[in-house]
Image (tube, grey):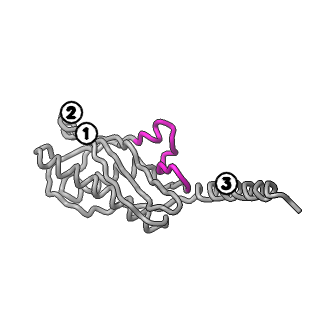
Amino acid sequence: MKSWKFYFKCFLLISVITYLLLLTSCSTKKWEVRYSPNFTIQGDGTVSVKKFKYLAHKNGKVKPNQIECPGIPRIFIDKNVDSFITDSIRTELSFAGFSLEKNSNITIKGKILNLIADYRPGFIHRWSLSIKYDIERKSKNVYSKSIEVTTKTGPIDFDRVQNTLQNLLSKSNKQFLLDAKRKNIL
């Protein structure tokens, strides 16, 4: 008869193999994402939007299209995070009536401080997005604000990833645009 130590070692081995299989199988899926404007301020004039910097990628923590995720699974989207977020603000501005030009007196740029999907088995999953927005007028910084938004979701699937990113970006963009408009910067 085998001892309990043998069965415990077998259990550990099976657990490690299962963990590694889950880790490698989840890391290759790319979630298709898109952004649709759903908040509108009224605006006019021209603005330039420089590509936002994704600090987690710049610091070597994640790949350019990867969302930070402390647990399993790894989450990749079909676009680079910096491009996706930059395009979302461009879309909102264009939808609001602004003209987007490369050489404008007003330039919007930013840093994606974090985009985290904290997926833990058996828990409510928390997503957070933190962006530092800057506005320059004639190369002089006239606005700087960090905005953090969070949301909670259930199990991971395409609709949930898409809707969660849409929700986070809409909240962040809305707060930024309202604040900049209120301060007569845009």
Q: Earlier in the sequence, mark 3 or mark 2?
A: 3
70 inside magenta stretch: yes
| Element type where label 1 sits in the image | strand
Of 119 and 97, the residue lying toward us:
119
Residue type, numbered disc 2? Asn
Disc 2 target residue? 141
For the point 46% across and 37% down, which residue is it? Answer: 58
Which amino acid, by three-letter code, is at mark 1? Asp
Q: Residue at x 33, y 57 (%)?
A: 168
Asked if residue 115 lies in the magenta stretch, the reply is no
Q: Position of residue 71 (x, y in %)?
A: 53, 52
Tell me which label, 1 or 2, sits earlier in the chain: 1
Residue at far top of view: 140
**Residue 114 quadrant:** top left
Residue stretch rendered in magenta on the structure: 54-72
**Disc 3 versus disc 2: nearer the observer:** 3
Q: Is residue 155 left or right of residue 2?
A: left
Do tag 1 and tag 2 residues touch (Cβ < 8 Å)? Answer: yes
Q: Which residue is mark 1?
A: 134
Query: Amino acid type of disc 3?
Result: Leu
Residue beneath the point at 47% across and 36% down:
59
Horizontal arrangement in the rendering, residue 44 relative to residue 176 (left or right): left
| Separation of marks 3 and 2 at Cα, in angstroms | 47 Å
Furthest residue in direction right, as rendered = 1
Task: List x then y, in percent, for residue 101.
Answer: 25, 46
Q: CA distance from mark 3 to mark 1?
A: 41 Å
